[in-house]
Image (cartoon, rainbow, N blue to C red):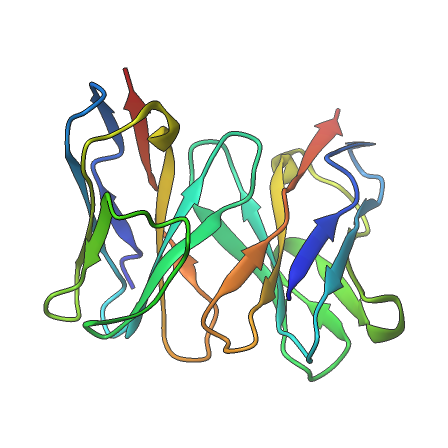
Amino acid sequence: AQSVTQLDSHVSVSEGTPVLLRCNYSSSYSPSLFWYVQHPNKGLQLLLKYTSAATLVKGINGFEAEFKKSETSFHLTKPSAHMSDAAEYFCVVSGNTGNQFYFGTGTSLTVIP
Amino acid sequence: DTGVSQDPRHKITKRGQNVTFRCDPISEHNRLYWYRQTLGQGPEFLTYFQNEAQLEKSRLLSDRFSAERPKGSFSTLEIQRTEQGDSAMYLCASSRTGQPQHFGDGTRLSIL
């Protein structure tokens, strides 16, 4: 069975400092992994995806994530937080058919001015 | 690319009433998904269409829920005899095969 664990429900950083949002996954095969961002009362926007190519994936808005199979992790990072980054972030793993997607419970990012 | 559109954005109804939501996917996207998201949780998969065929349904989708995509374009999600526990955000997403999903802004359902 596939599952995703987001290790922090809330992360708070100062503007201009690095961001680290942690995600571990469980899968019996080689999954596709995604990070989405959700601003209040909005749908989800894709930040980046991993689909078995390069293990370091670059996304939009300066975010990137590294797939580490040995650690079953797919942590999201950004070198310097911006106020506009404050939102809810979801780590997502695909099901074995590629048709279902399993979301983590989300990490709320607060950026302090 | 006009994005995924959902209507209405908000729906307030009394318990026991039926409600129907509509989703217009990005044109030429053959796949369409419905999710439910409750407060403080990630979206939970409900069902998925490839063109007009409903290929997968979650166990979350009780017999009070029905979804259709009659012409392989827009989709509707109907909830019959609504219950308090149905209060949630209902999200629609669409994609091309093998590509990431694009989400709409959702329909927030409140049951009085």
Task: Give the image location of residue B55, x and y in percent.
Answer: 31, 72
Give the vertical position of B43 relative to A15 (above or below). Answer: below
- Quarter holding the C terminus of chain B? top left
Q: Is residue B105 visible?
A: no
In the image: residue B103, left or right of residue B24: right
| Residue furthest top in the image | B112
| Residue furthest left in the image | B71
Task: Give the image location of residue A12, x and y in percent.
Answer: 78, 30
Give the vertical position of B41 relative to B46 (above or below). Answer: above
| Residue furthest right in the image | A70
- Quarter holding the N terminus of chain B? bottom left
Q: At 69% from the left edge and 84% from the top edge, which residue is drawn?
A: A53
Q: At 24% from the left edge and 30% from the top edge, which residue is drawn?
A: B82
Q: At 70% from the left edge and 75% from the top edge, which residue is drawn?
A: A28
Q: At 29% from the left edge and 27% from the top edge, which residue is drawn?
A: B83
Task: Give the image location of residue A82, x and y in percent.
Answer: 70, 39
Snapshot quadrant of residue A64: bottom right
